[in-house]
Image: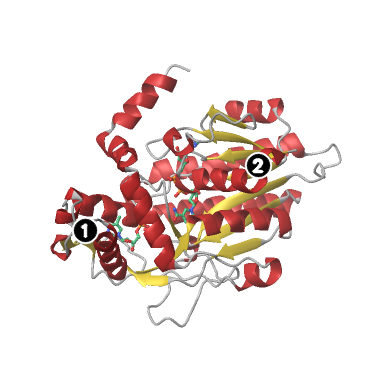
Amino acid sequence: MRTYLVTGGAGFIGSNYIHYMFRKYGDEIRIINVDKLTYAGNLENLRDIEDRDNYTFIRADITDKDAIAAIFEKNDIDRVVHFAAESHVDRSIETPEVFVHTNVLGTAVMLNCAKAAWELPDGTFKEGKKFLHVSTDEVYGSLPDDGTSYFYETTPYDPHSPYSASKAGSDFLVKAYMDTYRFPANITNTSNNYGPYQFPEKLIPLLINNALNGRELPVYGDGKNIRDWIYVDDHAKGIDMVQEQGELFETYNIGGHNEKRNIEIVNLVLDTLLEILPEEDPRRKHVSKDLIKYVTDRKGHDRRYAIAPDKIREKIGWEPETKFEDGIKKTIRWYLEHEEWLENLTSGAYQEYYEKMYGGR
Ligand code: NAD
Ligand code: TYD
């Protein structure tokens, strides 16, 4: 039975990945989820799998080397899937050092603890051990708005925000471990994810939450920045395929050629809400294009991201399964059906609850 150490599994992509893995492998695998439970970590995301015998949650900080080393000592870990990070660009503009601490130092600690646990006396590594570092396409910088160029695995790094700079730093550490020690790892660089369990600071859940509550929908700058959207389950599938079928030491870009301008997303979310919400639903009366408000642009706002997924498609056979029109409906339905989840996060009740539950441990 393979044992996975998943970091950041209580966050958006990590929790979707854990669900995906249990759907796919059932009792054939064991998952240990290590998460600090920052504001972005939410054990509610894992409520339906938390009682499984082959799942364990450990609250720990990835920058705490003693805590991470102890997890490797007590468990024979076969796979690390490293999601834990500070992930929001706007927050990184406010507090860059928090991003450097978690994303760079945290990744160094994860790499070092895995290396210590997996390295043999001759400097090679135990058979079959693998580390996958989950990263972003934002490390490649910003593309021109003319739709002619894409991010390839060979595109030079050119990060602009403190978030993407810290992710680039973490990617380079993984590359350094592979080059220096032949440490068995892969890196995936992925475009903007959307789907259930995404914290409502990110564009799509923020729009849904605000629209349902009749609050303004803030559109940065001219609203024409382009992001390349991928449904979170397609990303989870890509991560698993890279780890099991990819070549060690390689980087794979994961994206589905689904570029949209932000204002298109805003209009689509509003149209879809009006399509889905029944006439008698009281939330429907708030939903209106009048809520759209153009606001001051994000500092250093990257214009366009767009992934070329040729390598993962050709070498591994990965393809996205969810069309954006279907994925966005599924996502909006999920938020409509999980109003309490949203309320708990946005009211702060969730944080208080978990501080009380886990604070003294
Ligand atoms: P998220 O913010 O929703 O979740 C991050 C998780 O990491 C949270 O559960 C948080 O509690 C945990 N965490 C933060 N600091 C920690 C620490 N010091 N120790 C232990 N746990 C800690 O993020 P996400 O959107 O799920 O992103 C996951 C990963 O995927 C990140 O590495 C991010 O850079 C990358 N990524 C995200 C996107 C996207 O669109 N969201 C796209 C490409 C890559
Ligand atoms: P976001 O979801 O923060 O992801 P990222 O910055 O990592 O791409 O933002 C997606 C796009 O939406 C980005 O171009 C910024 C824009 N945006 C807004 O226009 N308004 C908002 O309130 C937010 C959060 C984002």
Residue on which disc 1 sits: 218
Who's the residue at 46% across and 55% down the image? 165
With 344 as the anchor, is 74 left or right in this view? Answer: right
Circle 2 or circle 1, nearest the eye: 2
| As drawn, 32 above or below 284 | above
Who's the residue at 33% across and 70% down the image? 225
> In this orientation, which residue lies closer to the viewer: 258 or 96?
258
When asked about the image quadrant of residue 246, the answer is: bottom right
> In this orientation, which residue lies closer to the viewer: 96 or 247?
247
| As drawn, 295 above or below 341 | below
Q: Residue furthest top?
A: 360
Residue 270 position within the rendered picture, expressed as x and y whole percent measured from the top left:
25, 63
Q: Quadrant of the N terminus?
A: top right
Query: What amino acid type is highlighted by mark number 2?
Result: Gly
Residue on which disc 2 sits: 26
> In this orientation, which residue lies closer to the viewer: 202 or 23?
23
Query: What amino acid type is highlighted by mark number 1?
Result: Pro
Q: How is the image coloured?
A: secondary structure
> In this orientation, which residue lies closer to the viewer: 3 or 270?
270
Residue 214 appears in the picture as rendered: yes
State the CA–CA distance, disc 2 to disc 1: 41 Å
Q: Secondary structure at mark 1?
A: strand
Residue 186 position within the rendered picture, expressed as x and y whole percent measured from the top left:
66, 55
Q: Secondary structure at mark 2?
A: helix
Residue 149 position within the rendered picture, expressed as x and y whole percent measured from the top left:
48, 79
Residue 235 position within the rendered picture, expressed as x and y whole percent measured from the top left:
54, 57
